[in-house]
Amino acid sequence: MINRKLLMVERIMYVDSTTPLNAVFTAKIKGELSEAQINTALAKIQEKHALLRATIDNSNEKQPLFVEQKNIDAIPLRIIERKTDKDWFIESEKEWSRLFVEKNKPLAQLIWLKGDGISEILWVMPHCICDGTTIANLMREFLCLLDDPSLLLEPYMPYQSIHEFLPAAYSNKNKKLKAELYLGLARLFFLVKRCGKKKASGDNYALHWKLDLQTTKQITEKCKTNGISVHTFICAVFMQAFQHIQGKSAKGKVISPVDIRHFIPEIKEDHIFAFAPTIELTLKSGSLLENAKRIKQDLLHKINKMNVRELLWVGEQMHPIVQKMIAILRSSPGGHDITLSNMGRLNIPDNFKNFELETLYSPTVAFPWLNSNTLVVSTFRNQMDFILMSNTDFLTKDQASAIKDKATQLLNVSL
């Protein structure tokens, strides 16, 4: 049974009991679905993942807890009549404001946009329990169960403490002294760094676009020919686009989340987990391809230097100042242009016996931070899909559209 405090990184993504922070992932399906099949699939998924049988006890706002409930309700299914191809986008934006606070309700919801022979399925989850890999895996499990209800999912033991991922040395006296030092330095830093007065109070929004097969193929081949990764190329493209549109106010920096499963193999691809360590990458002078090559080297260097178990351990020492950290995020413009999450090729089958998975749309999320600029990229059926999100208080929709157009131009010009 789960009964544990939220990790520091989960605590940040939780924010507080009145602030929603959700991720929404959408699949478009051709074929006939049944409510009974959907509920059967959801029941098996909930049985596998203990966190989908838990709620958040926020009776102590400073230290909320995940608590598994013995008789928790089933994952709710909301059925909406599908009218247009844009309904999924509208519903996705609506779900940003959902609060998962109802008693005995799980930390997930499924929306079925039901049309005549065509549907969209939306997974909605609070970001404090899921990263991109988590929500993609849940969609994969759901689709596979929808196609074959007899499929068995293997439950796993949820972790109860961060120390399950740490060597025994992290409990010795020297580490405890080091922890006190880290906390003391952090307190001093936040004592000096004051929260700004401005907070994001505008409207959250998203821009969505998808590249065609030919353009995606050309980008992939161009990157391979030049010895760069698609991810670092996209980083360079968007930093340059920000620089072109914003001029001197652009930061020339991007924050890039990395899947923690690369560093801690105990956390499997099909396990629910929320923390993704991040790396800051910087735009230099030179051509787009030169920057992409430098960014690739910088990314590999920083990944090789990362000690993610240490980062998890250090984070857990910061609980006394986590509310200060959240306040800074909500009031500071930060030193970066955008957080860029590239999910790569989604590990989800494209062939099913009983329906056709037409496409997947990159997850959407609306951060309550002052700098909420976020780009999520994914690839399915050899098409790259982009979602650019922000808040009108920080980046106007016109500016975001101009950045999107410039980035698209750079993607095509470089081919």
Image (cartoon, rainbow, N blue to C red):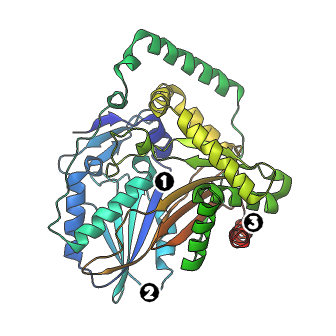
Which residue extends farthest right? Answer: 248
Q: Secondary structure at mark 3?
A: helix
Question: Outermost residue toward the left?
Answer: 150
Instruction: Kindly check if marks 2 and 3 are in contact, taking CB atoms under 8 A apart as contact.
Output: no
- From the image, state whether disc 1 or disc 2 is nearer to you: 2
Name the residue beneath numbered marker 3.
Answer: 399
The residue at which mark 2 appears reads as: 83
Q: Residues within 10 Å of mark 1 (few under 14, many from 20)?
A: many
Q: Amino acid at mark 2?
A: Lys
Hey, which quadrant is residue 404 in on the image? bottom right
Sooner in the amino-acid sequence: mark 1 or mark 2: 1
Left or right of 304? Residue 148 is: left
What SS does tag 2 mark? loop
Give the label on residue 20, or none: 1
Say which residue appears at 69% left-offset and 73% top-offset: 412
* Image quadrant where one finds the N terminus: top left
> Which three-letter amino acid code belongs to the residue tagged 3?
Gln
* Mark toward the start of the polypeptide (3 vs 1): 1
- Tell me the crowding category of disc 3: few under 14, some 14 to 19, or many 20 or more residues within 10 angstroms, Cα based: some
On the image, the x and y values in percent for residue 306 come to 53, 34
Viewer-side residue, 335 vs 78 = 335
- Tell me the distance, in whole angstroms, between the alpha carbons under discs 2 and 3: 30 Å
Return the residue found at the far front: 225
Nearest to viewer (mark 3 / mark 1): 3
The type of residue carrying mark 1 is: Pro
**Front-lying residue, 138 or 319:** 138
